Amino acid sequence: MAREGVKSSLKGFSQERCEKVSAGVLGSCPSLLRRWRRARDRLPTSGRYAVPRTAARRSRHVHSIDQWTGASVRRVLLAGLLLLALALGVGGGYYTGDRVDTPEPTASGTAGPLGTVSESPSPTPTEPPLPVKTPVPSNLEPLEPGFDYTRRSFTVTPQDQRSVQLSIEIPEGWKQTRDPKRPQEVKYLDDQKERGVRIEAVEPVDTTPAAAMAQLIVDLKKSQPPENDVQIVSHTTDTIQGEDGDPRPVATLIYTYIPGETLRYVIVRWIAIDGQLTNVEMSITGIPEDAAALDEVLQRTSTSVHEVG
């Protein structure tokens, strides 16, 4: 059995011949010869040079089994990985689809500090305008024309301007009164303080009587609430003659309104006493029944007023 397993290329060799040849070849190198002899002595004689084909076949068989087993394992692992990837892909697809179809809200932009949270104020309802007042009839006795007049002189100081001394004729018995907040004017009132004359020095002198009247008409509409029922009776321009004989351009506005309970009657006149521009403004007030008497006062004061000095 051992000889049948020996390769054909080794036939004809014997142990003795092999040793002689080996000794001859290795004799030139004692160290190699010693190593060869030690290796020879450790091997059994019967299997020293045999190359068992059975072992080779078994080796090849085991190797082929190992190769098949490794390949099979790799195929199984690959199939498992493929199945796992497929399962993950399908599950991931559903998950991804769900996320895309119903996205979660995300914040965007730069975060800033939170302010104080407060409820939005409710819109303030627009209050309906108050109804126009119905005036209460005045219990005053109407004034009658035919006053006695007296001359009065006074000094007024327009804001940021020089003081001005004026002289004017006023109904006798009407007393002077001043408002410290308005140094540019004086008032003369009757005993009941229901009628009066207000005289004001106008500075700077830069407006014509007509322009000043037009501005007051606008201001009246703005300053008086609708329920006071401002009514323009007349507005005119004219030229009158002063006591000195010189012409005086004037503008006159007459209106009524209801500041309290009774209807008031007001005459406002702007006078250019020494040129074309307004330098004196006056107003005369009372009730509508006083119209004739108040017009008399207007004419007397307008012609008599002048600057002193």
Image: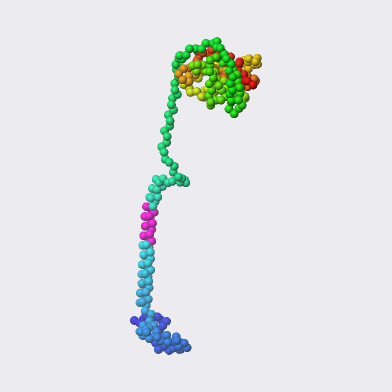
Q: Is 139 a magenta residue? A: no
* Displayed quadrant of residue 19: bottom left
Given residues 35 and 293, the one toward you in this image is 293
Given residues 199 and 290, the one toward you in this image is 199
Residue at (42% x, 36% y) in the render? 120
Q: Quadrant of the N terminus?
A: bottom left
Q: What is the magenta range?
A: 78-91
Residue 162, given in percent of the width and then of the height, sits at 61, 26
Residue at (58% x, 21% y) in the render? 154
* Displayed quadrant of residue 24: bottom left
- Locate residue 289 relative to residue 8 in the image: left or right: right
Colour mapping used in the image: rainbow
Look at the picture and state if 293 lies above or below 218.
Answer: above
Residue 180, given in percent of the width and then of the height, sits at 53, 26
Given residues 21 and 186, the one toward you in this image is 186
What secondary structure characterizes most of the magenta part?
Answer: helix
Query: Does the rendering let one see residue 251?
Result: no
Look at the picture and state if 304 lies above or below 62.
Answer: above
Query: Does the rendering let one see residue 5?
Result: yes
Residue 51, given in percent of the width and then of the height, sits at 38, 80
* Displayed quadrant of residue 82: bottom left
- Locate residue 19 relative to residue 219 in the image: left or right: left
Residue 166, given in percent of the width and then of the height, sits at 60, 20
